[in-house]
Amino acid sequence: LGQNQVVGIGDSGLDSRHCFFRDENFDEADAIAKRQAAGGGLGARFDYPNHRKIAQYVAYTDGDEGEVGGHGTHVAGSVLGSFDEGVTDTLIEPGQEWYGNATSHTGMAPAAKAAFFDMGSPVLPYIYTPDDLEDMFMPAYEVGARIHTNSWGANWNVYSGNCRSTDKFLHENQDFVVLFANGNALPQFTTGSVGAPASAKNCLSVGAARNSNRSLNITKYSYGAPEEPRWWHTCGTDDCADEMAFFSSSGPTYDNRIKPDVVAPGFWIHSAQSDIEADTCAIAALLGTSMATPVTAGNTALVRQWFTDGYFPSGSPNKEDAFTPMGALLKAMLVNGAADMATQQLLPPNGVIDLSGSSPNIMSGFGRVQLNNNMLLSGNKAGEKYVFVDGDYSDMPVLEASGDSKTYEFIVEEGASFRATMVYYDAPASELATVAIINDLDVAVESPDGTIFYPNGLSAADKLNTVEQINVVATVSGTYKVTVSASSILSGPQPFAVVVSGEIEEPVTPPGGPDNTIVIVIGVGCGAVVIVCAAIMFMRRRSPPSQKDMFTDVEAKNPAYDLSNPGGKLPEL
């Protein structure tokens, strides 16, 4: 899982001697010494083409994590940690029996490699970013990374300089996807608490869900007092994985856009714990949107591999079907497959907020990432569903000017259901813009009887969001038209990506059909297959020995934000 994928990570540092990352055929101590001696800055770049796990290390501030329990090491472990051949003991570390076997804690994409950008220094509760985030994204891009994850941000709901540089890079590099943690609101979720750069238009902003009941039951034993569970061991739903964590920052953005885009488990996530000197296999449990974001990044790598290895559309690897996906397509896949959340957790005694049937919303966005709702694999039938995509980077769907459109036609049987998601990377707005949107693309569905379905629960076109989704249950049989149209293009051309999933058969291209129309047949009970992915989202077991969460303010103009500020650190529970 994750073969031939490189994921960029910008964070506090990486303990390359941890068994999740070390290479037994590589002198890790010598490499760390050379990185430390490089003096920092963008020139302190070290590429490792033959390393087992680390493709690149940019020692922007220093060349190592340098502390016990570092944030960046934990984040990297959740993305792609995997054990080297030198690990022979099934127990990770003495005294950590509740964590189980070593193989229980590999990252979401354990065969992937990291391009790490080190922005932290030991024990300092903040990190330093480049003035222009392109300086962080581009080195990773040059060694093959097309995914970049960032578990940091500011407690400002604005369109910041980092938002602009993120949107600019993505608009200019349509095969890239950037993830940001949505933020941790304190003492509990509040509306409009999303932070920058998660408030950027084109990034994938990630909120934090809770976890399965089984995982929370394991958490009790780490305290040695299972008969006295803490309040977080219970939740308002049958499965705590359907509940939003109390601290997860909420939208909308300052200009009323939906954030987060998606959510993932971020409540006591077990991953790598760094050490100062000795080689280690230690594990730590942390909570925050900082933890949900790398889990999502690892799953994004699996989606990308599904395309680059040619699993789409047959469900089996086929070189002839392989293609490079647009970053917007990866984002659309995650959004299109997201599962509705049931409730928003509040601090006792406030109960929960009912979220059922409300997606998208400003608390859980489009829902919890769920790979088996979209990704088809042969031999794993979990329903009758087909997935159609348009988002090949070598042949991107593009609208050139205002008024242009592209239509996808579906012949649908009465009672069949489908979901259509459209995502595009908009041109960057000016820093501190009052409204961020520049190019306005819209998606709509027209039924055979002329009824128009609009996205995101609206009764008209969405004029603010770059992510739009429509759910349709066919009330009549016939041709349903999904149309992406350019209401306004001020800086064109504008590429976009589309994902449609449902009770769909193979696409059918009509003889003599217009170039801008694709026809697809949808029917009930058509017998396609759906993925059951072993690395699907839920499954990192949790326990809470510490509460360090580095959702910090790292805007270039404020590089020394202190985590002691209650807006940047989770409280003791």
Image (cartoon, rainbow, N blue to C red):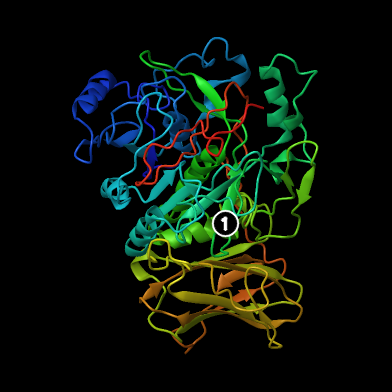
Instruction: State which quadrant residue 101 falls in.
Output: top right
The residue that appears at 27% across and 48% down in the rendered structure is 135
The residue that appears at 30% across and 51% down in the rendered structure is 132
Instruction: State which quadrant residue 326 falls in.
Output: bottom left
Residue 212: percent from left, percent from top: 70, 36
Give whichever of 184, 375 is nearer the camera.
Answer: 184
Q: Quick check: 232 left or right of 545?
A: right
Residue 12: percent from left, percent from top: 39, 33
Please determine whether, in this image, residue 16 is positioned above or below residue 418.
above
Give whichever of 97, 383 is nearer the camera.
Answer: 97
Residue 126: percent from left, percent from top: 41, 34
Please determine whether, in this image, residue 381 is positioned above or below residue 16.
below
Give whichever of 297, 204 is nearer the camera.
Answer: 204
Please determine whether, in this image, residue 184 is positioned above or below residue 448.
above
Quarter in which the C terminus is drawn: top right
Q: Amino acid at mark 1?
A: Lys
Please determine whether, in this image, residue 78 is positioned above or below residue 471.
above
Q: Quick check: 18 left or right of 214?
A: left
Query: Does residue 230 appear in this view?
Result: yes
**Which residue bears the numbered disc 1?**
259
